[in-house]
Amino acid sequence: DFRQVNDIYRISRAIFLAVKQRPASFFKVESFFYSHIDNALNLIESYTRLAKSPKKSKAEKQKLEQTRITLDEVKRTLIADLKRINEDDYNMLDIEMELNRMEQNRKK
């Protein structure tokens, strides 16, 4: 559970820092700021509080298991947001590598 929460934190932080460095990229991940992060925080807060409580019934344990599954889905959504924000950087990297290759071929 800790690893899952930590992964969500790291991904969210990466998205936040990327937008902080390049504010224009905000619009690519607008849904992250308006819904995804709020949803993740609410789920994590409720899950951690309820998971600590002792003597859970079967139904309560089942709800916690469903919440873990939902947190996995939230994590996948955040990963998609991160990929969307890094997309231009990877495209730029491809261009730079191609330019470098062309320059190396020209020098031969």
Image: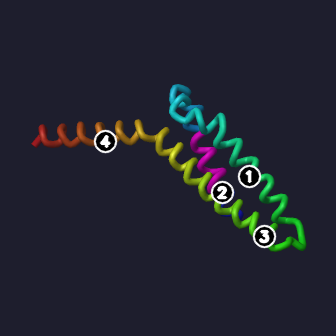
Q: Residues within 10 Å of mark 4 (few under 14, many from 20)?
A: few
- Indicate whether 1 appears above or below 105: below
Q: Which residue is identified by label 4?
A: 94
Quadrant position of the N terminus in the picture: bottom right
Q: Nearer the viewer, mark 3 or mark 4?
A: 3
**Relative to 97, 50 lies left or right:** right
Task: Answer with mark 2 or mark 3, whichever residue precedes in sequence.
Answer: 3
Q: Residue type at mark 2? A: Leu
Task: Answer with mark 3 or mark 4, whichever residue precedes in sequence.
Answer: 3
Element marked by disc 4: helix
**Relative to 87, 28 lies left or right:** right
Mark 1 → mark 3, Cα distance in angstroms: 15 Å
Q: Are marks 1 and 4 in contact (CB under 8 Å)?
A: no
Q: Which residue is identified by label 2?
A: 71
**Residue 69 at x, y percent in the picture:** 64, 62
Q: Are marks 1 and 2 in contact (CB under 8 Å)?
A: yes
Disc count in the image?
4
Q: Which numbered disc covers residue 90?
A: none
Q: Residue type at mark 4? A: Asp
Q: Which residue is identified by label 1?
A: 43
Q: Residues within 10 Å of mark 2 (few under 14, many from 20)?
A: many
**Relative to 28, 20 lies left or right:** right
Mark 2 → mark 3, Cα distance in angstroms: 15 Å
Specify start and end residues of the magenta stretch as a single range.
Answer: 6-16
**Residue 98 at x, y percent in the picture:** 24, 40
